[in-house]
Image (tube, rainbow, N blue to C red):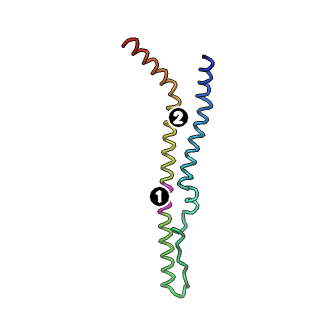
Amino acid sequence: MISFSLHYIYWHYTKALSDLSKIIGNFVWFVLQLFSVSLLCRTFFMPFKRIQDAPTSILHPEAFIEAVMVNTIMRLVGMVLRAILILCGLLGVVSVLCAGICFFVAWILSPFLVLFLLGFGAMLIVFG
């Protein structure tokens, strides 16, 4: 029984903590992939839905200015939408990291909590 307890404690504070950190890393990777943060960063300055207006000729200044304005507006719309999605993804990563830290602390303290609750329950049984 003592050998089992020692093996459990060894596993709980070595292998399991290592696996837990890998699991948290997998959740972070999942959130980054879910929001496609790397792709959004690479295409940050691309026009929204690739909507572009090709300028016909500089000889027609109205058409040229219209095309430049449409292209500028579409790039700004694309940047704003991508920035919002990137921020949501980063907020998701921060949330996963906070939850992971909380779970990490709970994992470390759980054996002590079990011992405390067993002692408290025994005290309640004995002293009523």
Residue closer to the observer: 30 or 87: 30
**Residue type beneath disc 2:** Phe
Quarter of the picture containing the C terminus is top left
Quarter of the picture containing the N terminus is top right
Q: Is residue 100 shown in magenta?
A: no
- 10 Å crowding of disc 1: few (<14), some (14-19), many (20+): few
Q: Is residue 81 shown in magenta?
A: yes
Residue closer to the observer: 60 or 96: 96
Relative height, residue 50 to residue 17 (above, below) = below
Relative height, residue 65 to residue 44 (above, below) = below
Q: Position of residue 14 (x, y in %)?
A: 61, 30
| Left or right of 29 on screen, residue 120 | left
Relative height, residue 55 to residue 24 (above, below) = below
| Residue furthest out toward the left | 128
Identify the element where label 1 is drawn.
Answer: helix
Mark drawn on residue 84? 1
Residue range of the region highlighted in magenta in the rendering:
80-87
| Residue furthest out toward the top | 126
